[in-house]
Each structure stands twice: as structure tokens, then as C-alpha cells.
Amino acid sequence: MCLVEGVEMYVARLGEGYIVKRMPDTGSHHAPDCPSYEPPAEFSGLGQVLGSAITEDPATGETTLKLDFPLTKMPGRSTMPPIGGEGGSVSSTGTKLSLRGLLHYLWDQAELTRWHPGFAGKRTWATVRRHLLHAAEHKLARGDALRARLYVPEPFSVEERDSINARRLSQWQTAVPALGKAQQLMLLICEVKEIVPARYGFKAIVKHMPDQAFAIDEQLYRRLGRRFESELALWGASDDIHMVMIATFGVSSAGVPAIHELCLMPVTRQWLPVEDGFEMQLLDKLVDENRAFVKGLPYNLGTGDRIASVALTDCEGSAPMLFIVPAGLEEAAPGLDAAETSFPMWLWRRSGEPMPSFPPARTRSPRSIAPAQA
């Protein structure tokens, strides 16, 4: 057990087997170095959507997700997805997951927000893909299995090109329009190689899919440049940044995939999500110092909402919460005062002050629990 007094768990039947799972909303009750540990929901965007947009049934082990974007083709022009929180938008209520919120949830569930020195050199696209698909299992969205709707490109291989294409086309059949019926859309999570003009309109070229691009209409392309200007600038400024895209797409009767809505998420070389260059500096230093941590994600929250960038999981006692305080904000946001919480706090005020030293790691050997994944 991760704690002497123990933490209640339960056995869930999933498919043909059984697994031991933590009780809903108890991740923060576990020891920070336990595989079942999860930072307190109130320190990330998860707290806003848990229990409303995300509900878990312990009796079945299944999780129901409420989405605020369509999975059927709607008439009219393409629109950028509401990410929540921006300008007091009503989409920030947390009752449904935005497209970005869904990507953050799956990234969290796939444990791709976790880092441990033992993961160095082992987190490849094949690893990312495998854990994302596993995270989508036993999740329901709009009454259907999320896993059946999700397409994550396989690592490309010249020798396996034909079989990879055959599996892709077979999965895409559900997204081909049928006469007299609403077109069913699929979800795509991939790494973007480039988004460029095409002979007609624009196209997104995806890594591991050299023979198939995704069409983007001009209006969506223009909105993409405005909405994700900072993410695209970060991507263009550093070769160490990967750009992950989540999108809804349909397939024409001619077999051409076209994106309807999309959201971009920059990630580091270790596939850890970053909001800006300051978070990139923070994560790079933590990785260089061989620290273990969990990266916080905003889900539906906007830029004005304060969340912990990182929870350190290799310290004695409770995991310290690491915050980056924007320039011009003299004090931490309400509710993040160290005196008002039982969790240790670390603040980096980025208005010219150097990054403070991190809380020290434990000196004793950690419990002998193998990392859950790489």
C-alpha cells in the first residue's frame, strides 16, 4: 500500500477481465509517488469539469463524457471550437468538454502528463499512440464508444504501408456520408508536420501519414492563424516543440478527409504539454534535474484562470504545487495562497525574477513500484 493506513480501491470488470481502480475523486489521497496518485482537481482545469462533463460509474468502470462540439456534420460554415473560459464565454461553465478539454482529458488519462527520469528516451509516438487508445477505452461520448470514433495514426513503415492504409480506410468507413443521413464525424489526434496551401484551399500534413493529407477550407485556415497565433509562434521558434492536433473530420465519397474543427497543443520532446515559453523553461529544467512530476492542464479554463503548472511527486510529504505567476500580478491569484491550503506552494514570478530553486527531492529511496508506463 502507498500509505500505512491504506486508501480505498475497488475492482472493476472491464471487457473480459478485472482491474483494481482507485475510487472516483480520490487520486490526491494517494502518496505522490503512487501510480494511482493524481494532483487535486482544484489545481487544474479538471476540477471544473469533473462530475458534470466527466462522470464515472464505479459499477461498470465506464466514464461518460459530455461534449460541446458535434460528432455529426452540421450545415453551414466551419467554425473554430470554443475552448472555454475566453472572454467569459458560456462554454466555460464546465458542463461539457470543449475539443481542447477532451484532448487534455485523454492526455491525462493516458498518463502522458506524468514524467519520471526512467521514461527518458522511451516515450516515442508509438508509446503515445498506444496509451491514448487505451485511455479512450470504456469511455462513452454521445452514446457511442469513444474508442470507435478515435483515429490516431500508426507509426509509418514502408514495409507495412499497404496494411496500415487498409486498416485506416476500414476505420474511416463510418465517416463516409450516406445518402439521406447525417454524416458521422471521427476524432483525430496526431502530430502536425505542416499546415500549408494546397492546389485548392489548404491542407494539414500529418506525421506518419505521408500519402494522405487532411483538407482545410480557407475560413477555418484563417481562424486557425488568429486563434492559435501564440501556439504556432512557439512551434516555429523551437525545434524541440511538437505540435499535437485534435480535430473532428469527415471523409468525402471520394475518400478525401476534411477537417471541420480543430485545436492545437504544443508539447515538448517528452510529449509534455506546454502553454508558452515559460512553461517550456520550467519543464526542461525539471527534466534536466531528473525530477518526477505531473503536468497540470487547463481543460476548458481560459488564460485568466490560475492553475498549477506542475505537481512535484518526488518530495517528502505532500506534492508541492508549482505556479508561474504572470508579469504584473504582484500576488498569487485568490485561493492560491500557501497559507490557505495544506499543499506546499512554489511561485515563479516571471516579471524579471530568475526561476527559484525547486523544493528538494526526497533523500530516501522511493518505494519499489514500477512506473505505470513510459
Image: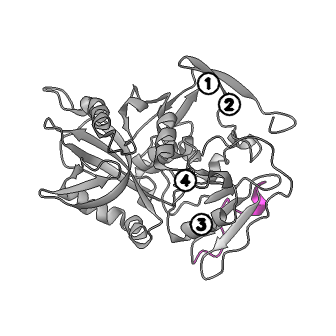
Which comes before the other along the chain, label 4 or label 2?
Answer: 2
At horizontal 18% and vertical 58% (from top left) the residue drawn is 218
| Labels 4 & 3 near each other (Cβ < 8 A) | no
**Front one among 65 and 241:** 241
Q: Is residue 94 above or below residue 321?
A: above
What number is the disc on residue 284?
Answer: 3
Q: Which residue is mark 1?
A: 58
Give the mark nearest the N terminus, 2 or 1: 2
SS at mark 1 in the image: loop
Q: Judge from the rendering whether residue 37 lies leftward or rightward of residue 172; answer left or right.
A: right
Q: Are marks 4 and 2 in contact (CB under 8 Å)?
A: no
In space, the residues marked 2 and 1 are separated at their CA atoms by 8 Å
Q: CA distance from mark 2 to mark 3?
A: 33 Å
- Look at the numbered disc 2 and give the secondary structure of its residue: loop
Question: For the residues marked 4 and 3, what is the alpha-carbon distance in whole angstroms?
Answer: 17 Å
Tell whether label 1 touches label 2 (CB within 8 Å).
yes
Alpha carbons under labels 1 and 4: distance apart: 25 Å
**Tag 1–tag 4 contact (CB < 8 Å):** no
Give the amino acid type for the residue marked by disc 3 in the picture.
Asp
- The residue stretch that appears in magenta: 328-343
| Disc marking residue 297 | 4
| Residue type at numbered disc 1 | Pro
The residue to which callout 2 is attached is: 23
- Report the amino acid beneath label 4: Leu
